[in-house]
């Protein structure tokens, strides 16, 4: 099957290229695969995700996502690509002036779906992440873990072909974490999404096959 | 409450700008009118031995826009009436040619003097007289008012534009984060800045309506009782439908530029 992500001799850097975070990494992820990425704090996990959704251009080497060259992609093409991604951020990045429900359906709003579809989808997802009660609240009225679940619901709301999740269970207890892992498994297994999840702890019980990458000393290695 | 303040902070400077613009339009209309009258009452009389065409005069100085020959027969008759036994035809033949020149605008005294000298230097021209010098004091006062007016309007617009920019920075702060999150999820610029556009367009239309209303009141209620001759005669100088269109276009233009610059400055920097 086709590759959703292909990295070849990829180097990622900040500060105008002076501060290299990842160097000469090559890997690929095929459609429908589930990938865990682990590594020490500050090793560059979030940096890799940034490159995958196009907020950071490769310094050298190539990175392609969904067949698009992330080093050369135009702004408009990048926006188009992003409407097909589901991103969960380590720091949530919710819109604080919007209700939880509206936050969840942001991808649907951008895609121009009607209000009825937005509402049904919001209701369903909020039920999945156990936040039905909080639909009308604003993000700053929620606990950290609740905000994180809103972020996950938002990432899943438009059945993205690629899910990029940065520590989606970082702030959750075991029960809530399992709810999230179930949703991710389901997105991959039932809906066919490709999933890349950064986490510091791979769940002990995981029901579908997965790959495991480690980022360490500026390299990306696969654990087999 | 907060949103009312948000609106006012944009609406008020916008109003100030539009009022300035409408003042400029009205002022220009009124002054063009009087300037034209002044121009027409200013003329130069030339006495020449040769027949000259308007083109000949224009070649002497490009400020000269028209040259009307004065009918010699009437002059001849005038002279003949004062003399006995003189034949019209004889006088007519001995008379030189008279021309009345008009200039393209009201020129300063040195400029007129220069034209006079040029005319006198031209072959055949014997005498040059200027008329309308008595209007000069009026015209100078007029120029002075114009300078004062433009300085005032310029300053007012500058301050208002500054306020618009300030409000734009407030918007920037308030909306930057939301716009950036929307961008990560692929929202195009128009969608990201939709709220600002809606707000800005409402303010722009509101400001236009208020200014149009103000000048309509001036036209229909103030002008007739103003005691100013030109306003009583020509009330349409104070407001024309065209003005409303110009004002709306300017207001919307300011909104578009403002919102786009907020949107562009909030745009993600790809490292
Ligand atoms: N915008 C930036 N400019 C410069 N350096 C940065 C920037 N963002 C991150 N870094 C640096 O890049 C390195 C990798 O950061 P990154 O956020 O990718 O780490 P991480 O693996 O996600 O860590 P954590 O597990 O703590 O989230 C860190 O040393 C960090 O200080
Ligand atoms: Mg991180």
Image (cartoon, coloured by chain):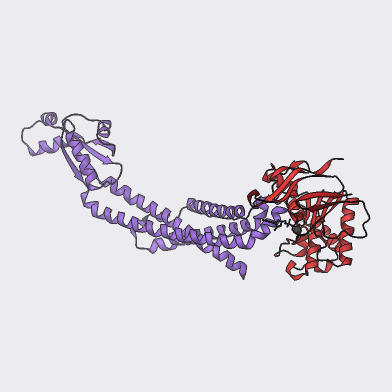
Above/below status of B3 relative to B192: below
- Rendering coords of residue A135 (x, y %): 80, 66
Q: Is residue A190 visible?
A: no
Above/below status of A26 relative to B175: above
- Rendering coords of residue B20 (x, y %): 44, 58
Q: Residue at x 52, y 58 (%)?
A: B208
Q: Quadrant of residue B180?
A: bottom right
Q: Colour of chain A?
A: red
Nearest the viewer among B109 and A187 is: A187
Q: Quadrant of residue A146?
A: bottom right
Q: Is residue A195 visible?
A: yes
Nearest the viewer among B121 and B247 is: B121
Q: How many marks?
A: 0
Nearest the viewer among B210 and A55 is: A55
Nearest the viewer among B7 and A110 is: A110
Q: Colour of chain B?
A: purple
Q: Left or right: where does residue A182 sit relative to residue B113?
A: right
- Rendering coords of residue B55 (x, y %): 28, 31
Q: Residue furthest left?
A: B84
Above/below status of B34 relative to A6: below
Q: Residue at x 65, y 58 (%)?
A: B195
Looking at the rendering, in which quadrant would you find the N terminus of chain B? bottom right
Q: Residue at x 59, y 58 (%)?
A: B200
Q: Residue at x 87, y 40 (%)?
A: A1
Rendered-image quarter of ligand 1: bottom right
- Rendering coords of residue A129 (x, y %): 85, 63
């Amino acid at each position: 099957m086709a590759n959703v992500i292909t990295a070849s001799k990829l180097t990622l850097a900040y500060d105008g290229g002076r501060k290299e975070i990842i160097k000469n990494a090559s890997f690929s992820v095929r459609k429908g695969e589930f990938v865990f990425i682990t590594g020490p704090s500050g090793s560059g996990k979030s940096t890799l995700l940034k490159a995958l959704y196009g907020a950071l251009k490769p310094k050298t080497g190539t990175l392609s996502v969904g067949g698009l060259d992330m080093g050369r992609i135009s702004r408009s093409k990048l926006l188009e690509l992003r409407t097909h991604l589901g991103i969960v951020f380590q720091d949530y990045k919710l819109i604080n002036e919007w209700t939880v429900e509206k936050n969840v359906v942001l991808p649907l709003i951008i895609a121009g779906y009607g209000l009825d579809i937005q509402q049904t989808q919001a209701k369903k997802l909020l039920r999945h992440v156990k936040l039905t009660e909080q639909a009308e609240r604003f993000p700053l009225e929620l606990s950290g873990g609740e905000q994180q679940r809103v972020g996950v619901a938002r990432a899943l709301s438009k059945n993205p072909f690629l899910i990029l999740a940065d520590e989606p269970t970082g702030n959750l207890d075991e029960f809530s974490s399992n709810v999230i892992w179930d949703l991710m498994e389901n997105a991959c297994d039932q809906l066919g999404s490709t999933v890349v999840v950064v986490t510091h702890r791979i769940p002990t019980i995981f029901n579908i096959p997965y790959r495991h990458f480690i980022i360490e000393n500026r390299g990306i290695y696969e654990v087999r | 409450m907060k949103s009312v303040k948000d609106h006012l902070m944009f609406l008020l400077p916008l109003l100030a700008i539009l009022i300035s613009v409408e003042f400029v339009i009205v002022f220009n209309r009124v002054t063009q009118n009087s300037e034209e009258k002044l121009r027409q009452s200013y003329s130069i009389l030339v006495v020449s031995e040769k027949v000259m065409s308007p083109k000949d005069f224009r070649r002497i100085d490009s400020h000269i826009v028209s040259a009307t020959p004065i009918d010699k027969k009437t002059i001849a008759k005038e002279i003949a009436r004062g003399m006995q036994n003189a034949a019209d035809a004889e006088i007519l033949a001995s008379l030189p040619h008279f021309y009345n020149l008009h200039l393209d605008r009201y020129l300063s005294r040195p400029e007129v003097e220069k034209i006079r000298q040029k005319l006198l230097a031209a072959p055949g021209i014997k005498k040059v007289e200027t008329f309308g010098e008595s209007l000069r004091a009026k015209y100078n006062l007029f120029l002075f008012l114009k300078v004062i007016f433009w300085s005032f309007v310029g300053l007012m617009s500058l301050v208002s534009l500054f306020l618009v920019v300030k409000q734009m920075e407030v918007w920037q702060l308030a909306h930057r984060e939301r716009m950036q999150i929307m961008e990560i999820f692929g929202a195009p610029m128009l969608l990201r800045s939709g709220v600002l556009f809606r707000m800005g367009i409402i303010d722009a239309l509101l400001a236009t309506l208020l200014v149009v209303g103000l000048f309509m009141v001036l036209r229909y209620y103030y002008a007739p009782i103003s005691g100013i001759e030109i306003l009583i005669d020509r009330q349409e100088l104070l407001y024309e439908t065209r003005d409303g269109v110009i004002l709306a276009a300017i207001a919307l233009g300011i909104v578009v530029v403002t919102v786009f610059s907020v949107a562009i400055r909030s745009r993600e920097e790809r490292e």
